[in-house]
Amino acid sequence: MSAQGEEKPAPVLQLEGVSKSFGGVRAARDVSFSVAPGHIHAVIGPNGAGKTTLFNIITGVYAPDSGRIRFEGADVGGRPVHRRVAMGIARTFQNVELFSGMSVLENVMVGLHVRTRCGFLGAIARPPWVKREEKLARETALDWLRFVGMEKVAETPAGDLPFGWQRLVEIARSLASRPRLLLLDEPAAGLNARETRDLGALLKRIRAQGVTLLLVEHDMSLTMEISDRIMVLDQGVKIAEGTPREVQADKKVLSAYLGG
Amino acid sequence: MADKKERSGSPGQEPPEPVPAGATPRRAGLGQRLLPYAGYLVVTAGLCAYGLWADNYYYTQLLTFIGIHTLLAVGLNMVMGYAGQISLGHAAFFGLGAYTTGALTVHLSWPPLAALPAALAVPALVAFIVGMPTLKLHGYYLGMGTLGFGMIIHILFREWTALTGGPNGLVGIPVLSAGPVSLAGGKTYLFLVWGAVLLSFGMCSRIVHSRVGRALSAIHFSEQAAAAVGVDTMRAKLEVFVFSAALAALAGFLYAHMVTFISPSSFSFLVSIRIVAMVVIGGMASIWGSLFGAGLLTLLPEWLHVFSEYEVMIYGLVLVVVMIFFPQGLTRGVLDAYERARRRKTGAGPSA
């Protein structure tokens, strides 16, 4: 694995021999890798390499056929999606999945779901602690909108925003759950050059908050610039892993991309 | 401020910025602050006025029925309008509430108020048990599942003769009384029912504007995304389904003690469809729309006698028309049409 002699802190995320097939298609074959805390870790690979499948396995949408997933040392294998969010794994979607009819602020407030606790009876009785929680949730959501620069559209229905802005709102929503690991599925897809540059800066600011990032990305210049480590997948198999420089020099990677 | 930010776990490194206008709850005038309560005030005032001046048995009955139907509609609206889950078997919970209290008061001679907790708990429990497997389904499949459930319960009402009186119905349900105080008489009961309606509106509106309500809305727009941000979608759907069943059961309880005679036909598939039509016409995700939908579909059959003969056909037609032309419901649709017409009149200029 990593040959460098640096001391290694305990990984945030660790996959051990994870495999998953759909019918005859093997979307992940014995994938093992680990993500160090505070890193921006990218997963790249040609279309159909199994990147999104890997995300769905890590977040709990799919159960792997075999293998283990550890988050901060704990095996999260059998836990449902929402439990993993509560543990500190958040994600965004390739095609941005906002709650389109709800306001931008409400979207981010739903992101606070696992950090708040008012239930059905609490909502009906509305005791003082629920009012306080509600107020705090509103303020916190606004803080996260400010963090991504979207506070001015807080009251706008999320579906009315331009695509690039929706993406930022989705990031704010995922951050609201206070994750320690954030999975971003092609965050730069559909963004123009300027927006992509801003996104790179935002991702670094998120890392500075102590959040470890795992991203799937097609925009190579962005990936190479911001990533601490890159893993390359091809047809469900990990074919390379290393720093951006190492990966760029790797022959197997070149042939996978150029179809050699 | 800094201390608060710490606790709320917000990104602390950001330079402090002035809070934008939309951020703090706007300081509203008295009128604006009363606006959310306007509906409650209007309904209360209307009832008081009716109580003071009117004295017409027929209208009192009719208004009481509207109240009971509104309870049904607002409960279903929580499931359909807010959480986006269709239920075509809601008459079953209405019936379970009515038959539970009916059986307890007729066969076991319980006082009605003592039967109330059971009349709410039994349907709620049934909703919980039925909801667990059924709410895993989506779209049409959920529709079919709940439809089947409604039919099974309807058959149960008809066939379990020892308990329900079978097709002949259950006769001799006592009217409501709290100890020596009778709550029966026309107007008293009217106020009681509408008290329950306003209470349920208050509860629903609080749920909608809470963490729970946001989670339900989120499920409506994207169940996958709701789960991905940490909402236990199954639990949220189950809770709202049980709550909705309890409201329908309350309606059933009030209905049974009003008419004192219940039979399976009052809780058939057609009734389930009628409740759905009330929600759709009044407006999905609109609490006050439920009142409008329930009112309209209670009055129409009374006013237009042709209506009752072609009821199913008309509901079908109305549902199709409303869904195509007023997907937001008739209330919202009419308001929007009015708004458009006014704008067209006031000026053809590009901006007002």
Image (tube, rainbow, N blue to C red):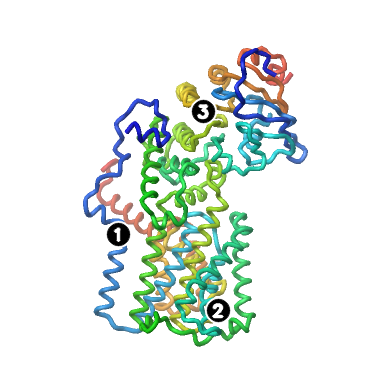
Circle 2 sits in a helix, a strand or a loop, which is it? helix
Residue at the image point whose x is 50% and y is 74% from the top: B311
State how far apart marks 2 and 3 are (Cα). Answer: 60 Å
State how far apart marks 2 and 1 are (Cα). Answer: 37 Å
Quarter placement of the C terminus of chain B:
top left
Relative height, residue B273 to residue B259 (above, below): above
- Number of numbered discs: 3
Residue B18, percent from left and from top: 29, 31
Q: Are marks 2 and 3 in contact (CB under 8 Å)?
A: no
The amino acid type found where label 1 is placed reads Tyr
Chain of the residue where label 2 is placed in the rendered structure:
B
Of the numbered discs 2 and 1, the one sitting upstream in the chain is: 1
Chain of the residue where label 3 is placed in the rendered structure:
A
Residue B335, percent from left and from top: 34, 57
Residue A198: in sight, yes or no? yes
Circle 1 sits in a helix, a strand or a loop, which is it? helix
Residue at the image point whose x is 29% and y is 83% from the top: B55
**Which residue was labeled with disc 3?**
A211
Q: Callout 1: 10 Å neighbours few (<14), some, many (20+)?
A: few
**Which residue was labeled with disc 1?**
B37
Could you say which quadrant of the image residue B43 lies in?
bottom left
The amino acid type found where label 2 is placed reads Ser
Residue B342, percent from left and from top: 28, 53
Q: Of tags 2 and 3, which is closer to the observer?
A: 3
Relative height, residue B50 to residue A84 (above, below): below
Relative height, residue B144 to residue A243 (above, below): below
Residue B135, percent from left and from top: 59, 57
Q: Callout 2: 10 Å neighbours few (<14), some, many (20+)?
A: some
Q: Is residue B167 left or right of residue A148?
A: right
Relative height, residue A204 to residue B225 (above, below): above
Q: Residue B265 got which mark?
A: 2
Circle 3 sits in a helix, a strand or a loop, which is it? loop
